[in-house]
């Protein structure tokens, strides 16, 4: 099963599985296809994390997070008075970090794949060279970048027609991107980090006032890291370690929630939302202040993911009243001082791969080196630009995540694999910046605690709290009016927002709702209530209608 937020990319993964490839082969093929068919978020010019668990039980995380250029400085986005310069870390070449996607995908393929690079990359090259027909959902995403495309002739030539957005049914052909992919297929990462592509990137960066030099590209490396692991109600969690905060924060959050009877309290109830909010509040204090690139800072992962630490957090949670975020922070006990896409793959042998990759904002920094065909990230905004200043996603972060040459910015990406009795149970992740962690956690809780089917679990409306600002963000229909009033009486403030994230998930076990009686009518619905044991289910989040689940 392959699930992603772009149907053609999912189909590419299924094609590779049919050809005898394993889950890693399929995941790498999907990654390259996403760079073609999902320009907002799939990429060659960004980075991410791949969590993989092999059928023999070994687990690894391929860290291909972007890195700060060698000329980067801690105050590079501040004015003479020390104030953050508006959008300086988001727009243009100066916002670009050294991309990691190409080396990350190739490292995974070389270490764990089974098919040649040329075979795995062939579908993406074909889609770029021959083009593909845009669906309404594809065109809607591209339309959001219209003004940025108009401002750059290189982008306008690809993504606009006579200065207007591409329409559903039009064919998007990307010849320069096809040539770049062909070069990578032939020469591997050297084509990107040392060859003609590197020359074009460095030249365009210098012309645009950016910092990336050929030496930065040549120096880029992909570490293979040990995942963060924990347990939740008898299930084992495998997720991404620093420089992603995702796995650490996910485990800390689930550890706190494990002692509460969420299934009994009910989905969306005031009690459940209150407890989840209080847990999130504490988790994001640690996420925002204690974590960073492990090559630069010591990350207290073992302490933050311990059951004892979760118990200490619960001891400070009032079951009836909200804790004001101003009363929490680094150094306040028990805390110490100190646009994205996701896809999931599971093969018949039991190899599971979860990949979250990003340009950061939609279309990244909205720049492209002429002749390359791919957009560049604006991931430098994920660093702490100035302690106390919120980034694109509203996160207020600390010095552990300060900019330094060669450093990887802290991420919220949470590519996760859940196992039960040594076998894959869930493979999932999501885009959404700071909201990734809570989206993944809620999908897991929806299946395990609330007994939802996989599709129900990923589609269910979500809530989010990230310590600062002190607000509960809620999607439409997540909370009833009565629940909002009950939360307000406890001291919470709820703000309604448009839906966010897109959990792309695979489930390989029975997901019958807990305690739900079978209906005595409408026999055509029975399969929804009784998933067939042994069947693999894939669910594309309805928040990304361009996506699909695909089986070989």
Image (tube, rainbow, N blue to C red):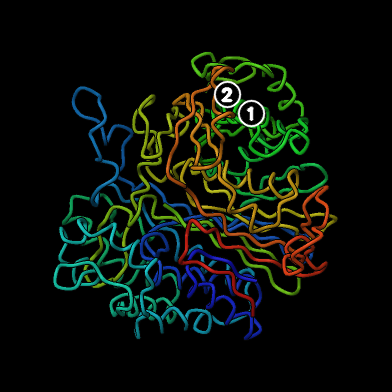
Q: Quadrant of residue 249?
A: top right
Read off the residue under disc 1: 270
The circle on residue 8 is none
Q: Position of residue 426 (x, y in %)?
A: 70, 57
Q: Secondary structure at mark 1?
A: helix
- In the rendered image, the residue lying farthest to the right is 421
| Lower position in the chain sequence, tag 2 or tag 1 | 1
- In the rendered image, the residue lying farthest to the front is 521
Q: Residue at x 78, y 30 (%)?
A: 259
Q: Nearer the viewer, residue 33 or 371?
A: 33
Q: Position of residue 430 (x, y in %)?
A: 54, 53
Callout 2 touching callout 1 (CB < 8 Å): yes
Quadrant where the image shows the N terminus:
bottom right
Q: Crowding at label 2, few (<14), some or many (≥20) Cα neighbours within 10 Å?
A: many
Q: Nearer the viewer, residue 109 or 450?
A: 450
Q: Residue at x 59, y 69 (%)?
A: 549
Q: Position of residue 110 (x, y in %)?
A: 58, 72
Q: Position of residue 351 (x, y in %)?
A: 71, 67
Read off the residue under disc 2: 487
Q: Crowding at label 1, few (<14), some or many (≥20) Cα neighbours within 10 Å?
A: many
Quadrant where the image shows the C terminus:
bottom right
Q: Does 298 sit above or below residue 506?
A: above
Q: CA distance from mark 2 to mark 1?
A: 6 Å
Q: Secondary structure at mark 2?
A: helix
Q: Residue at x 38, y 73 (%)?
A: 135
Picture mark count: 2
Q: Is residue 204 left or right of residue 18?
A: left
Q: Quadrant of residue 375?
A: bottom left
């Amino acid at each position: 099963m392959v699930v992603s937020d772009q149907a053609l990319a999912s189909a590419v993964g299924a094609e590779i599985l049919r050809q005898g490839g394993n889950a890693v082969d399929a995941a790498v093929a999907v990654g390259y296809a996403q760079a073609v068919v999902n320009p907002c978020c799939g990429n060659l010019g960004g980075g991410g994390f791949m969590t993989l668990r092999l059928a023999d039980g070994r687990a690894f995380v391929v860290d291909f997070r972007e890195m700060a250029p060698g000329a980067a400085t801690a105050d590079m986005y501040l004015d003479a008075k020390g104030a953050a310069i508006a959008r300086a870390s988001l727009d243009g070449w100066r916002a670009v970090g050294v991309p990691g996607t190409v080396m990350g995908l190739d490292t995974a393929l070389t270490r764990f794949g089974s098919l040649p690079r040329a075979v795995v990359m062939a579908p993406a090259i074909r889609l770029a060279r021959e083009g593909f027909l845009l669906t309404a959902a594809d065109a809607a995403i591209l339309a959001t970048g219209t003004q940025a495309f108009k401002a750059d002739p290189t982008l306008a030539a690809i993504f606009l027609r006579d200065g207007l957005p591409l329409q559903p049914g039009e064919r998007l052909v990307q010849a320069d991107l096809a040539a770049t992919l062909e070069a990578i297929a032939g020469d591997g990462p050297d084509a990107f980090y040392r060859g003609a592509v590197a020359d074009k990137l460095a030249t365009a960066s210098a012309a645009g006032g950016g910092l990336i030099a050929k030496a930065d590209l040549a120096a880029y490396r992909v570490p293979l890291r040990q995942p963060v692991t924990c347990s939740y109600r008898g299930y084992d969690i495998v997720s991404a370690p620093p420089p992603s905060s995702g796995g650490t924060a996910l485990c800390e959050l689930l550890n706190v929630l494990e002692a509460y009877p969420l299934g009994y309290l009910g989905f969306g109830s005031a009690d459940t939302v209150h407890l989840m909010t209080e847990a999130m509040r504490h988790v994001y204090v640690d996420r925002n202040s204690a974590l960073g690139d492990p090559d630069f800072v010591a990350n207290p992962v073992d302490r933050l993911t311990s059951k004892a630490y979760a118990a200490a957090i619960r001891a400070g949670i009032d079951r009836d009243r909200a804790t004001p975020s101003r009363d929490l922070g680094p150094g306040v006990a028990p805390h110490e001082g100190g646009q994205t896409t996701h896809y999931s793959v599971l093969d018949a042998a039991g190899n599971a791969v979860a990949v979250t990759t990003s340009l950061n904002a939609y279309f990244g920094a909205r720049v492209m080196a002429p002749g390359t065909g791919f957009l560049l990230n604006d991931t430098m905004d994920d660093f702490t630009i100035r302690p106390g200043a919120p980034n694109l996603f509203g996160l207020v972060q600390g010095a552990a995540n300060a900019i330094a040459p060669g450093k990887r910015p802290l991420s919220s990406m949470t590519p996760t694999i859940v196992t039960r009795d040594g076998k894959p149970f869930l493979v999932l992740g999501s885009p959404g910046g700071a909201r990734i962690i809570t989206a993944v956690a809620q999908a897991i809780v929806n299946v395990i605690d609330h007994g939802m089917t996989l599709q129900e679990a990923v589609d269910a409306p979500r809530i989010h709290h990230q310590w600062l600002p002190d607000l509960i963000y809620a999607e439409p229909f997540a909370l009833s009016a009565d629940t909002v009033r009950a939360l307000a009486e406890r001291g919470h403030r709820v703000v309604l927002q448009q839906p966010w994230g897109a959990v792309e998930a695979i489930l390989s076990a029975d997901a019958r709702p807990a305690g739900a009686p079978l209906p005595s009518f409408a026999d055509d619905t029975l399969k929804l209530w009784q998933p067939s044991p042994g069947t693999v289910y894939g669910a594309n989040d309805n928040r990304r209608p361009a996506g699909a689940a695909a089986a070989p």
